[in-house]
Image (cartoon, grey):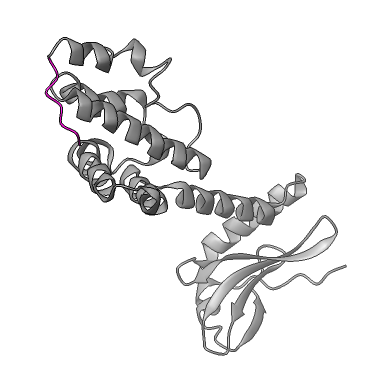
Amino acid sequence: MPKIAKELSAIQVSRLTEPGHHSVGGVTGLYLYVTPTGARSWVLRTVISGKRRHMGLGGFPSVTLAMAREKARTARSEIDAGADPIAARHAAVSRIKAEQLSAVTFESAAKAYIDAHGDTWKNPKHRAQWSATLATYAFPVIGNLQTAHVTQSHVLAVLEPIWKTKNETAARLRGRIEAVLDWATVRGYREGENPARWKGRLDKLLPSPGKIQKNGSSQGSAD
């Protein structure tokens, strides 16, 4: 039968400064680890699926003795129920990192797209026009949005104010937004249909550029 560790008080735990592993009692397998440099942290020694595991519970004194015991009890309850709290923690950290990596703003994506394709554009003015139209019309509205969060409503908020007055520019701008969002999709920064696509989407909501220009209402530039 395993030896039951003496349950130490908070004051007694605060006095544990000798390097090593100190059992503090209260929960089986709960230890305070003290490093040669004096750093102290909580560790729960346990067995999960037949394997000995060490689960970190935080540093002392930020995590108090009472908090460490509560964390250890919760972890042991999960283990007894068949769960693996260490694997669950690693999975949560992995998800957070993946979300952070995919949190690319539209402005960042647009600049990356231009950097990737700009050298292939024969006309040197083309790159400047791409940057100028996006910076003038798109970035103020959706530049700070993550590409994953850009919706059709956002695209319309960019295009509608200039669709009839600067239609040629607006039409080119729409295509550039579509290209940037396609790039973001392929890179894994967003999912789903492209909200800037013309056929089957925006053509149902905006008048055809050709019809506007034929009617003489467009004053668009060659941006």
- Check the picture and name the quadrant holding the N terminus: bottom right
Q: What is the x, y in percent for residue 79?
A: 74, 51
Asked where in the image residue 90 lies, by quadrant, the reply is: bottom right
In the rendered structure, the answer to whether residue 50 lies left or right of residue 216 reads: right
The relative height of residue 186 versus residue 88 in the rendered view (above or below) is: above
Q: Residue furthest right?
A: 1
* Residues in magenta, as a range: 217-223
Q: What is the x, y in percent for residue 60?
A: 50, 72
- Check the picture and name the quadrant holding the C terminus: top left
Q: What is the x, y in percent for residue 181?
A: 41, 36
In the rendered structure, the answer to whether residue 25 lies left or right of residue 120 reads: right
At a point 20% along the width and 23% down the height, the residue shown is 167
Asked where in the image residue 42 lies, by quadrant, the reply is: bottom right
In the rendered structure, the answer to whether residue 93 lies left or right of residue 81 reads: left
Q: Name the foreground residue: 142 vs 80.
A: 142
Asked where in the image residue 46 lies, by quadrant, the reply is: bottom right
At a point 50% along the width and 29% down the height, the residue shown is 192
The secondary structure that dominates the magenta segment is loop
Residue 121 part of the magenta segment:
no
Residue 220 part of the magenta segment:
yes
Q: What is the x, y in percent for residue 179?
A: 40, 36
At a point 16% along the width and 24% down the height, the residue shown is 161
Q: Name the foreground residue: 13 vs 125.
A: 125
